[in-house]
Image (tube, helix red, strand yellow):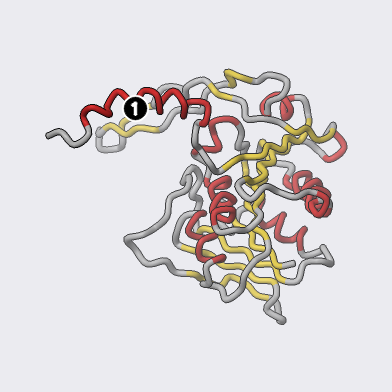
Amino acid sequence: MKLLISNDDGYFAPGIQTLFNALQALPQIETLTLIAPDRNRSAASNSLTLLNPLRTQLISESSDQKISQYSVNGTPTDCVHLGVNGALGFQPDMVISGINAGANMGDDVLYSGTVAAATEGRFLGKPSIAISLCGHQHFATAAHFFLKIFNSLEQLRLSADSILNINVPDLPITQIRGIKITRLGRRHASEAVVTQLDPRGLPIHWIGPAGVAADAAEDTDFHAVEAGYISITPLTIDLTHYQTLQALQQWAHLFDDYVGQS
């Protein structure tokens, strides 16, 4: 199997390096390529770099060229796009994004560069998984359970329009209580912008912290992680709100008499 891994924290981040090292131990891995931003690009979402050239830099490579690391002066989506669309001269069988430092649950998935990297893989026809550690300490825990999940994927047929979003509690391996299949929860609005003055007395602004969970019901990712369980949420790429289609179609008939009129 040929794997491409990426993230939004940067190629040097401890999460992706822990995953990169762990995956090398799997006998079924034929090629393992890490391609990730050259700096932290958290919350880059699905942005692509279109007006500037992208540069890949080889960071390390095994003697047989089957295990390699690259950095890119772009976004997580750029990295996966380059990796799948020919910049590295191979076609991965799967895209894995992470291990992210910090949770990607609820509304956060819309901003997340980690989830966006997996989404780009799915857009390009590759089964894709995003994995995040809900903290900054126990990356080995996330890697340990990811390998177990990965080794069982042959028993799961992923839908062609979905990715798996995994969130792991920031706990030692022995304190993880299990795995729960969840839906996305929902946060309250983020807290207020933090305004300060720079050394020249000019105002600067920081985006406020994320809001607390507004929907953390028992079947949500928030609830599972808080209770010590690994959360796995299937995310669909199709954002169409199908329940509203019929009502909109009826509403649109109001404009039928205006078609062709000046």
Q: Name the image quarter holding the N terminus.
A: bottom right
Q: Residue placed at 46% from the left, 29% from the top?
A: 245
- Name the residue rendered at 65%, 75% in the picture: 61
- The residue most toward the bottom is 63
Above or below, 247 against 2 in this view is above
Relative height, residue 139 to residue 195 (above, below): below
Tell me if 53 is positioned left or right of 216 in this view: left
Residue 92 in percent (x, y) is at: 65, 66
Q: Residue at x 81, y 38 (%)?
A: 172
In the image, what residue occupies the spot 56% across and 65% down? 84
- In the image, 40 versus 232, the foreground residue is 232
Q: Residues within 10 Å of mark 1 (few under 14, many from 20)?
A: few
Residue 80 is drawn in which quadrant?
bottom right
Q: Nearer the viewer, residue 244 or 197?
A: 244
Q: Determine the residue located farthest toward the left in the rendered image.
A: 262
Question: Residue 197: horizontal and vertical position, in percent?
Answer: 31, 31
Residue denoted by label 1: 252
The foreground one among 260 and 40 is 260
Rendered position, 4 above or below 199: below
**Amino acid type, mark 1:** Ala
Q: Provide residue 64's location: percent of width, then percent of height.
A: 72, 81
* Percent x, y of residue 3: 68, 63
Q: Where is the C terminus found, in terms of image quarters?
A: top left
Total numbered labels = 1
Task: Name the secondary structure under disc 1.
Answer: helix
